Image: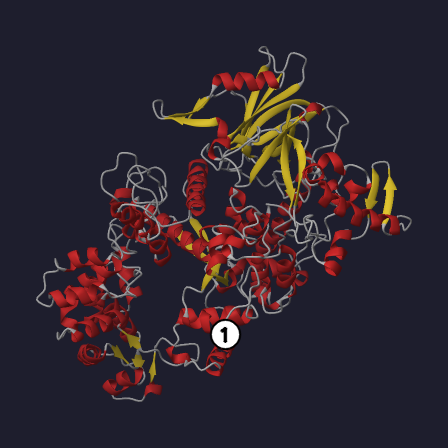
Amino acid sequence: MKELNEILSHQELPEEACEAIVQIVSRKRAYYEGPGSQKSPTPYGRYIEANQKEPIDLIEKMRGKCSVYPDEPRAPKLAVSSDIFNLLNDLNNLTYDGNRKITMDQKDEVFKIVDKKAKVEPKDIAKILGTDLSNISGFRIDKKKNPLKSEFKGYAKLKKCFKECGETISLKDYEALDQIIEILTNRKGIEERKQLLNLVNSSLITDETVNKLANLDGIANYHSLSLKAMKELNEEMYVSNYNQMQLIQQIHKGKDVSALKGKKSIEADDTAILSPVTKRAQRETFKVINALRRKYGEFDTIVVEMTREKNSADQKKSINNRQKFYEEKNKEVDKLLKENGYNPDKINGKTKMKVRLYLEQDGKSAYTLEPLMLGEVITNPRYTEIDHIIPISISLDDSYNNKILATANENKAKGNRTPIDAYNKHLFDNPTLGLSGDLQTYISVVQSSKRFSRRKKNYLLYKDDITKMDVVQKFIARNLIDTSYANRVVLNTLTDYFKANEIPTKVFTLNGNITHKFRTQINLPKDREEDYLHHAVDGLIIASVKTMGLLNGCLAKYELKDLYDQNTGEVKKVPGKEEFFDPKYIEFISTLKNIYDESNKYYRGIMTRNQLAYAPIKISHKVDTKPNRQVADETIYSTRVINGEEILVQKYKDIYDPKFKNLAEDIVNGKAEDKYIMAKKDPATFEEITRIVLDHYETFKDDPKQYVKDKKGVKLKVENPLTAYKEEFGKIRKFSKKGNGPEITCIKYYAEKLGNHIDISKNYDTKHGKKVILKQISPYRTDFYRDTDGKIKMVTIRYKDVSFKESLGLYCIDRDWYQSEKAKKKISDEAVFLCSLHHDELVGIVKKEGQKYIYDDSTESDGNTKYHDGITPEILKFTATNNDLDNRLEVKPIYTKSKKQLMPTIGKFVDVKKYATDVLGNMYEVKDNNLKLEFK
């Protein structure tokens, strides 16, 4: 603002204009207002519909619902009622002097201490109970196994605030204090807070306290329960010795589930706060269960696998090791603070986290490796920022492994991208922001770091496009906390449904590491990369545990080879231990292995369907037909008109990269003059680059370890010769008479004829017929035809070609455009429409007899090579059009992950058919295929 006012003071502008400019520049939307406006609605902002009159409260929208009463909003975490709830639960968990429990009178004494101090120490409780602290069990403990004190942080903040205004409060005022905390948690604008605080019906509220309260910070987050639930539970916990879980269980047993009564199908809980992918998984789960119930009737038992076992010895060991590791890191931080004259006790947690990251990063910023000043890191909150390496909206990972310390400008430049993506877009090479990062240096530093964990290194060097749905799904699938909550939602939904409809199906839970233990004991390892079949085997293991008592002792004592002969299937007897070895149990283990082995061999083409003793495992595939996905990537390209044709211009980003050999090979092979723009626009500079490369070639051309020649020309076998030049002399400079031209790092070249693109030239000031375009345009679907000559042809429809017409309420593809695309692909009007394929739909491809399968196991391992018979379709997962000009598709196998990219061209296809699976994995051919240019 100082800079702006200085600039305006030198302008001949009316005062009103200057004030308007200042207002525009200085305005700042509060974060709680969110994106969009009434005229520009967005599902992520306060206005989500076109004709919406009143804004949505975003904090309220994200607040969530009570675990006990789903219609009630969650209570503020720092509400006095929340702290009373937590304390009463802690007190009711205590046992002292044998089996004695705390009484109501003793609870009153505890609350008297809290009333005065806003906290209570374990030693205070021991004094009230009249016993030694060592005689009390049931305290929550810290990592050092010391009892935790109970703190009323919200109450303490309010107590201090009122005291400064000459007022006193007590726990008896909890209802009014809860209202105040509710306002301060929900509203972040000062004036907005004041207006609502003045409406609180309490004699405690004065003008002075309103002003003081409105400026309070640190009031945030919500509890898992509502004030309604906590009020009921607090009353019960005060008069009884039940803890919250015992009481909630009683409430849940009496829960009103009448709304579910009479429903034929189990429906997903739409009130649950889940990520979009997890919500979809929940819906698919119930689709499968409903389909199985219709086919087989009601289940005796349904077992829900949970994600972890919190009380196992391994889990405890892992937690202890992690705590010890963090403890050492904290000591390292405190030591550094003391050495630099700072009191660690007076440094807040966020700043300590910054210092810890500072140490881990060897005192440098994460992305451009700029040296950081420790004093600024500690004292200036705007100097550095803690950034999520992979944006948390994608990764759902708020752990330390996904956090680094970056300068404010680095964080601004990176935005909602990965570090590698930001480097590829030259965002860390920005003189305007004072950034001069080098990608190869960055990669080298990350790879060689001994401080970074393996997971953090993977995040820092992550190369996949995080805007793609399949990449997003991978991140979400890794998030165990989200999965654990989703499992709990499924468990509760099933329990409520069967209870409401008086169906005797029992619902159990099982910890996921039991499947791992069982697999280890029966020598059936799981390779997640091998195929998708292991999910079904896990399902069989989980389903069997409750009904067969599989881990009833014998697996802990004996190896599988001691129990039965894997070659003959004969069950061995151990004298005196017959009660442990149920032959049906051993038969189950044998069958489990055979089911997996046969299905694996069937899909690999080693066994035919007639050779199988068991039906193959079925796999269902969820397809994506939504037309409102991202249209293109963010990379902007330009074009030039060469000999009457539009040519795409691209850029090699670092001509000194040791692995970059294109430029050197083009120069040596005489292909550079017409390819590189610099050769025409700045011949003097390009001549210098040519001289360096040719000098290297003339020196080493006879050395086969340096250069080789084949039919295509000369190939460079060693690193880029410009790399060595840079190391010895520095970067090449643009030619100038004084020899002080700017350094050259990248070089533009003519890449290819302009293909499919989006022209955005209207947004830029372009000249001489140049265009500015977006190139990577994602395909939405591909339409297949059989023309009159018998050849298979296709039309690719991209997301940009689909628009939504509000008048029809449908997505539409322009008919004239579609006809012109057919004409370009030489598809006659008499051609027969075969089908439309979207991402992950199943395609059956028939090729001529004797031609190899597009995918079979022999392409990656020792499987048998499979050949087409000219009749039977090879069924694959359709990914998308890979290259429209070459009529090339991209496909994947349906039962496993292919290590190679499968990109067949349709020219060799005899037929194309569309297939699908129902939710139970039953595959069928889709025969009713009609061309749809208008759809929902």
Percent coordinates x, y for residue 604 in the rendering: 69, 40
In this rendered view, identify the residue nearer to me: 531 or 3: 3
Q: Amino acid at mark 1?
A: Asn
Q: From the viewer's perspective, is 477 left or right of 909? A: left
Looking at the rendering, in which quadrant would you find the C terminus?
top left
Q: Quadrant of residue 823?
A: top right
Tag 1 residue: 320
Q: Residue visible at 33% across and 86% down?
A: 133
Residue 453 appears in the rendering: yes
Q: Quadrant of residue 363?
A: bottom right
Q: Residue visible at 51% across and 44% down?
A: 467
Percent coordinates x, y for residue 597 in the rendering: 66, 46
Secondary-structure class at tag 1: helix
The colour scheme used here is: secondary structure
Q: From the viewer's perspective, is 118 left or right of 664? A: left
Q: Residue visible at 14% across and 71% down?
A: 172
* 672 relative to 6, above or below: above
Classed neighbour count for the residue bearing mark 1: other residues with Cα under 10 Å, few (<14), some (14–19), many (≥20): some
| Residue closest to the far left | 203
In this rendered view, identify the residue nearer to me: 604 or 635: 635
Looking at the rendering, in which quadrant would you find the N terminus?
bottom left
Residue 902 appears in the rendering: no
In this rendered view, identify the residue nearer to me: 364 or 143: 364
* 648 relative to 47, above or below: above
In this rendered view, identify the residue nearer to me: 759 or 205: 759
